[in-house]
């Protein structure tokens, strides 16, 4: 049985929960989760990758088992979440690492790369967007509206995204056989979303999501200049970030491997083995990226 450690770190007075596994001398893969989940989404992937990789999977502030301060005590922006993650890596002594990004994890990962371009040695993106082509217009329309005006009317349109029906849908849409998706996944998320004040935190992040697309040109420039290896493994039926978002990585990373699987947004719930195999095959390219940064 793979040893997976469940730890906490104090970052500026905030409790950051993280899962960790694998040898200390293995290449680090930082697992960055999306909305509305936590490092719980990687609970099966971590044992499958530990050994060849050292895995570090934090819960973002406001998610999972990490602190969820009120919005008047913490600035819920993607800049702030990335800053906490950067400080966690410093506490753990991690200087170079690959990123595995999904959903919200992507804009956090891109900020880490732009702040320290030499630190990130490779990218695995699993339904983690970096291109306008990836946005599914109908899904994102209320998010963009809330970013422009967070008044009561637009908030009312977004609040259902915090509820049971929407959270369950994120797990089951696009999955040919939804019985493969364990209900434990969305029940876990719903329980933690129900903590006092978390609704306001999540609404603040909805409002801040509009800050992410303006970063994309800088991300594209980093992909081109760094030449970091890229693996885009994607649920082709995702109605949040469509498959065009995966294919788009080839524009700036011509050697990117793009793998479209017959699943949805939370691909690990239905296609764990295929994703794990792809990430294990990616390891030599990540190692090449690590050695390139050492020179």
Image (tube, helix red, strand yellow):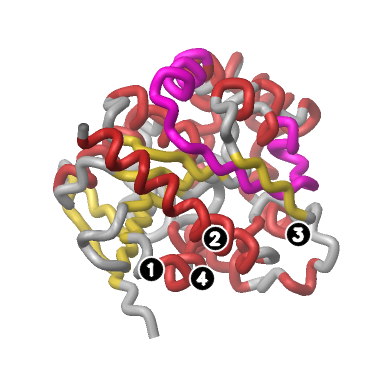
User: Magenta part of the protein: which range?
Assistant: 217-244
Q: Mark 4 vs mark 3: which is more N-terminal?
A: 4
- Labels 4, 2: front one: 4
Residue position for label 2:
189
Residue 4 visible in image:
yes
Secondary structure beneath dot 2 equals helix
Q: Distance between the residues labelled 1 and 2?
A: 24 Å
Asked if residue 211 shows in the view, the reply is: no
The Cα atoms of the two marked residues, 2 and 3, are separated by: 14 Å
Task: Give the residue number, with chain letter if any, for mark 1.
Answer: 50
- Where residue 57 sits, quadrant-wise, is bottom left
Judged from the image, the secondary structure of the residue bearing numbered disc 4 is loop
Q: What element carries label 3?
A: helix
Q: Which of marks 1 and 2 is in front?
A: 1
Q: Per the image, is 223 magenta? A: yes
Q: Is residue 93 magenta?
A: no
Q: Which of 39 and 25 is in front in this view?
A: 25
- The label shown at residue 44 is 4
For marks 1 and 2, the one nearer the N-term is 1
First-in-chain label (1 vs 3) = 1
Q: Is mark 1 in CB contact (under 8 Å) with mark 3?
A: no
Give the CA separation, mark 4 to mark 2. Answer: 16 Å
Number of the front mark, 4 or 3: 4
Q: What is the CA distance from the residue labelled 1 to the residue labelled 4? A: 11 Å
**Residue 184 sits in quarter:** bottom right
Residue designated by label 3: 172
Q: Tell whether 202 sits left or right of 11.
A: right
Name the side, left or right, on which 9 lies relative to 35: left
Observer-side mark, 2 or 3, equals: 3
How far from the left and from the top, in percent, is residue 119?
Answer: 28, 34
Q: In the image, what residue occupies the spot 67% across and 25% down? A: 154
Label 1 Cα neighbours within 10 Å, binned few <14 / some 14-19 / many ≥20: many
């Amino acid at each position: 049985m793979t040893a997976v450690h469940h730890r906490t770190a104090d970052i500026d007075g905030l409790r950051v929960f993280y899962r960790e596994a694998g040898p200390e001398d293995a290449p680090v893969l930082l697992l960055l989760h999306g909305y509305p989940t936590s490092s719980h989404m990687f609970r099966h992937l971590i044992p499958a990758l530990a050994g060849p990789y050292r895995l570090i999977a934090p819960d973002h502030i406001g998610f999972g088992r990490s602190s969820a301060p009120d919005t008047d005590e913490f600035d819920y922006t993607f800049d702030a979440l990335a800053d906490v993650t950067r400080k966690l890596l410093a506490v753990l002594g991690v200087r170079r690492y690959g990123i595995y990004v999904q959903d919200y994890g992507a804009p956090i990962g891109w900020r880490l790369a732009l702040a320290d371009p030499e630190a990130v040695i490779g990218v695995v993106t699993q339904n983690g967007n970096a291109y306008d082509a990836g946005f599914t217009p109908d899904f994102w329309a209320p998010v963009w509206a809330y970013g422009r005006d967070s008044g009561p009317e637009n908030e009312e349109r977004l609040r259902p995204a915090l509820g049971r029906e929407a959270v369950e849908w994120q797990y089951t849409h696009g999955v040919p056989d939804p019985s493969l998706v364990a209900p434990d996944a969305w029940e876990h998320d719903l329980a933690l979303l129900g903590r006092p004040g978390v609704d306001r935190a999540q609404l603040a992040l909805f409002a801040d999501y509009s800050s992410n697309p303006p970063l994309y040109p800088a991300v594209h420039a980093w992909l081109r200049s760094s030449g970091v290896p890229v693996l885009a493994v994607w649920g082709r039926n995702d109605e949040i970030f469509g498959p065009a978002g995966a294919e788009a990585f080839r524009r700036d990373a011509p050697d990117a491997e793009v793998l479209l699987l017959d699943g949805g947004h939370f691909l690990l719930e239905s296609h764990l083995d295929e994703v794990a195999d792809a990430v294990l095959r990616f390891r030599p390219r990540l190692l090449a990226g690590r050695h390139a940064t050492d020179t």
